[in-house]
Amino acid sequence: MQVTTHVLRKNVMAESEFTYSLNEIKQMSEDVLKVAKSLGASQAEAELSLSVGQNVSVRMGETENIEYNRDKGMSVTVYFGQQKGHASTSDLSPQALRDTVAAACNIAKYTAKDEFCGLADANLMATDIQDLDLHHPWSVSVDEAIAIAKACEAAALEVDSRITNSEGASVSSGTGFFAYSNSHGFTGGYPSSRHGISCSVIAESADSMQRDYWYSTARAAEDLQSVEEIGRIAGERTIRRLDSRKIKTCQVPVLFDPSLASGLISSLISAISGGNLYRKSSFLLDSLGKQIASPLLNIYEEPHLKKGLASSPFDNEGVATRPRQLVENGILQGYVLSSYSARKLGMQTTGNAGGNHNLIVQSGTQDFTGLLRQMSTGLVVTELLGHGMNMVTGDYSRGAAGFWVENGVIVHAVEEVTIASNMTDMLKMIVGVGNDVLVQGSKQVGSILIERMTVAAE
């Protein structure tokens, strides 16, 4: 059975599928603030959210799981001067909301004073809440989802006869909306959706058994990769890992494929995030305006990207988000701060309460094949194991698997090696950023080539 992307149709989901409408939960969030004020809170903020989702998985052509979720909740934070209380509930009845606010107020009375707590400054609230095209419900029935998953798995199994087993394929769909209000008079909220298809298979040869996977995720179902392509890539990634060979310990260039290159960028973002900075647990302390990476590294934050997986017109505190350059030619241009961490550092929030928004790493001119030629001899890393990075020192050591490269060509698979260096050195030794950009989350980046790392093997 062939199922292609024409099955991935968009169908607008009415708010009637939810218990409350977006306007109703906006009003409820404002009502919560009135209760907090009546109980003596000097400031308060509240968020209400509703979501529905469906996930279907198959394995070896048979349906394994059909899951539904329908969630709702409210969280409230109150401030009595410099004292803070927080409480949450999944019951949105009027009495439950009042009881939850009362609980938060009671908690605040017993907390220590913190001069840095409180709402973000009122003048930073978003006033122009633009539509970022984030809501694309997918009305896919269970039978259709099962057919899509089966087709994806079948495409993977057909890649090679050595693919003998499967960990399954899955199709997920979710949509929801939220409202946030605070006592500055700010109220905002919007609907959003996220859908995905994934597949993982197992291949074996005479002396080797390997697994690998692939997935696609998007706001709109029509933006997902085709089921045949997802299956094919999962199968090809699995087959190429068979018959790995040992290598000697060496110092060579290391090329991180796009799915792992985003992890390097995540480590950099963690090091310039407020929590690690004010706790002095970052290898990039006091680095603002300094050269922290190769001139080839340019990172741009674009919160207003249409259909972006991390797009938002305002952050978790109602602060307006804005596009900005985080790293320019290797020079750090800004930190990633919430209002609390900003106050601790004597700075102003960057609109990143809740995290970063669509980090776009500027691509170079070379594709993956071009970067292989540039590295000549070295290691391509396609899988990392463990969490071996010290955020304070930057020391980096992780188990890895991938491929050995000679004369710019992949010659065989490699596993059970450890790659090691220091993040401060790795960032400065970036000698290539590929244009093979992968969009699977909040970071958009191609392959990254590091000039030299220690590869520990035999």
Image (cartoon, rainbow, N blue to C red):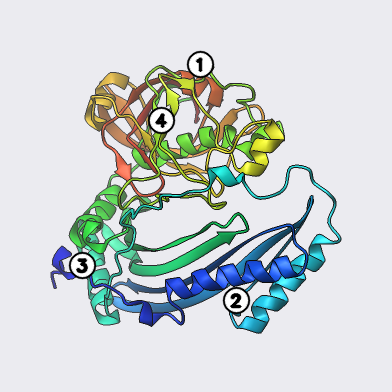
Q: Nearer the viewer, residue 446 or 22?
A: 22
Q: Residue 348, percent across and down?
A: 60, 35
Are there few (<14), some (14-19), or many (20+) residues within 10 Å of tag 2?
A: some
Are there few (<14), some (14-19), or many (20+) residues within 10 Å of tag 1?
A: some
Q: Alpha-carbon distance for marks 2 and 4?
A: 38 Å
* Three-letter code for the amino acid on which mark 4 is drawn: Ile
Q: Nearer the viewer, residue 366 or 203?
A: 366
Give whichever of discs 3 and 2 has the lower sequence position.
3
Q: Secondary structure at mark 3?
A: loop
Quadrant for the N terminus in the image: bottom left
- The residue beneath circle 2 is 90
Q: Secondary structure at mark 4?
A: strand
Give whichever of discs 3 and 4 has the lower sequence position.
3
Q: Nearer the viewer, residue 7 or 56?
A: 7
Are there few (<14), some (14-19), or many (20+) residues within 10 Å of tag 4?
A: many
Q: Nearer the viewer, residue 215 or 279?
A: 279
Residue 291, labelled with which disc?
Answer: 1
- The residue beneath circle 4 is 299
- The residue beneath circle 3 is 8
Q: Residue 324, percent across and down?
A: 42, 32
Q: Alpha-carbon distance for marks 1 and 4?
A: 13 Å
Q: Secondary structure at mark 1?
A: loop
3 or 4: mark nearer the eye: 4
* Three-letter code for the amino acid on which mark 1 is drawn: Gln
Give whichever of discs 2 and 1 has the lower sequence position.
2
Are there few (<14), some (14-19), or many (20+) residues within 10 Å of tag 3?
A: many
Q: Residue 194, percent across and down?
A: 36, 62
Q: Alpha-carbon distance for marks 2 and 1?
A: 47 Å
